[in-house]
């Protein structure tokens, strides 16, 4: 059973064409629209995996946000000590 509704505006010409096609196929207009959308989605479907998409998104975000390249794999674990050492050097505390 269909429970979702989606509406959009289209030209009178396109609406008439869709209604004509539905009459020609002896199908409800909703069935013609659903069939057309399903066909389009199958045709346009890419073979990009979730992992590839995540890698692409991470790369794009890294260009906007910047990258820390300290070479220290444990940097996040030692950040507190590094910040405190820098403050001691700067302010002599």
Image (spheres, grey):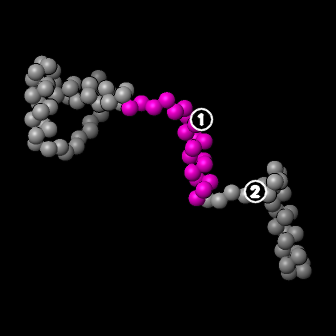
Q: Could you say which is closer to the camera, residue 18 or residue 8?
A: 18
Q: Is residue 30 left or right of residue 88?
A: left
Q: Main secondary structure of the magenta part?
A: helix
Which residue is depicted at the point 75% across and 56% down?
69
Which residue is depicted at the point 9% across and 35% down?
16
Q: What residue does disc 1 label?
A: 51
Q: Is residue 88 visible?
A: yes
**Residue 45 is one of the magenta-drawn residues:** yes
Q: Earlier in the sequence, mark 1 or mark 2?
A: 1
> Residue 74 location in percent, x, y?
83, 51
Which residue is depicted at the point 84% across and 74% down?
87
Residue 69, label in figure: 2
**Badge 2: residue crowd in 10 Å (few <14, some 14–19, many ≥20):** few
**Residue 13 sits above or below residue 27 on the image:** below
Quadrant in which residue 80 is drawn: bottom right
Q: Which residues are magenta?
A: 44-64
> Number of labelled discs?
2
User: Does dot 2 land on a helix, a strand or a loop?
Assistant: loop
> Residue 66 location in percent, x, y?
65, 59
Q: Is residue 3 visible?
A: no
In the picture, the quarter occupied by the C terminus is bottom right
In the picture, the quarter occupied by the N terminus is top left
Which residue is depicted at the point 32% across and 30% down?
40
**Residue 74 is one of the magenta-drawn residues:** no
Q: Is residue 57 left or right of residue 43?
A: right
Quick check: marks 1 and 2 in contact, CB under 8 Å? no
Quadrant in which residue 63 is drawn: bottom right
């Amino acid at each position: 059973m269909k429970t979702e509704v989606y509406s959009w505006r289209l030209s009178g010409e396109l609406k008439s064409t869709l209604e004509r096609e539905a009459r020609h196929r002896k199908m409800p207009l909703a069935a013609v629209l659903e069939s057309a959308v399903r066909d389009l989605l199958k045709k346009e479907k890419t073979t990009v995996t979730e992992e590839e998409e995540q890698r692409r998104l991470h790369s794009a975000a890294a260009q906007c946000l910047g990258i820390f390249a300290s070479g220290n794999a444990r940097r996040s674990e030692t950040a507190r000590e590094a910040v405190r050492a820098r403050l001691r050097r700067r302010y002599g505390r």
